[in-house]
Amino acid sequence: MLTTNRFARGSGVYACRVCKRNTRSTGRGDNEHVRLCAECFDLSGIENAVLDGDDVRKYADEIRSLYAAIIQLGGNAKSFNDLLFQLGDYCPDCGSTNTESNGSTEYRCVECDHRWGVDCGEHYGY
């Protein structure tokens, strides 16, 4: 999406309600009305789609990219950890990112041996 990288007259800085970093109007439309930065707004949309039944793996690259951008820009992305749990990138038990997959829907933490995944549409191990 096209965003502006300059301040516009009359647009102030505000703290994103999710990641708490300072941000401003991007010219994209809705994110400033709900006081979210562009990255949190996009991740919230993905989270909504996943909760509505979309496969989280369909958004894997975008989730990882937006999550990394929030952290790189100084924000706190913990609110979206559940999306990373579903991708197997982050252990819901110890928080380690040292994880492995069985190639399908089950994940294991190398650090603490915690296992989680999806079986018949039901999440387990969260």
Image: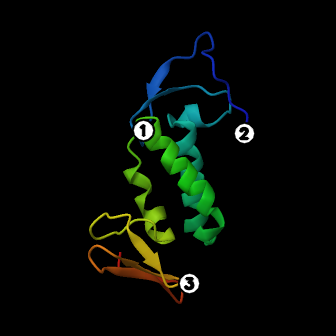
Question: As drawn, is 12 to the left or to the right of 61?
Answer: left
Where residue 22 sits, quadrant-wise, is top left
How far is disc 3 from disc 1 in space, using C-alphas? Answer: 34 Å
Q: Nearer the viewer, residue 66 or 100?
A: 100
**Type of the residue with mark 1:** Arg
What element does badge 1 sit on? loop
**Type of the residue with mark 3:** Ser
Where residue 61 sits, quadrant-wise, is bottom right
> Where, quadrant-wise, is the C terminus in this rendering?
bottom left
The relative height of residue 29 versus residue 13 in the rendered view (above or below) is below
At 26% from the left and 76% from the top, the residue drawn is: 112
Mark toward the start of the polypeptide (2 vs 1): 2
Q: Nearer the viewer, residue 105 or 10?
A: 105
Mark identifier at residue 17: 1
Q: Tell me residue 115's x, y (percent).
A: 36, 82
What element does badge 3 sit on? loop
**Type of the residue with mark 2:** Met
Front label number (3 vs 2): 3
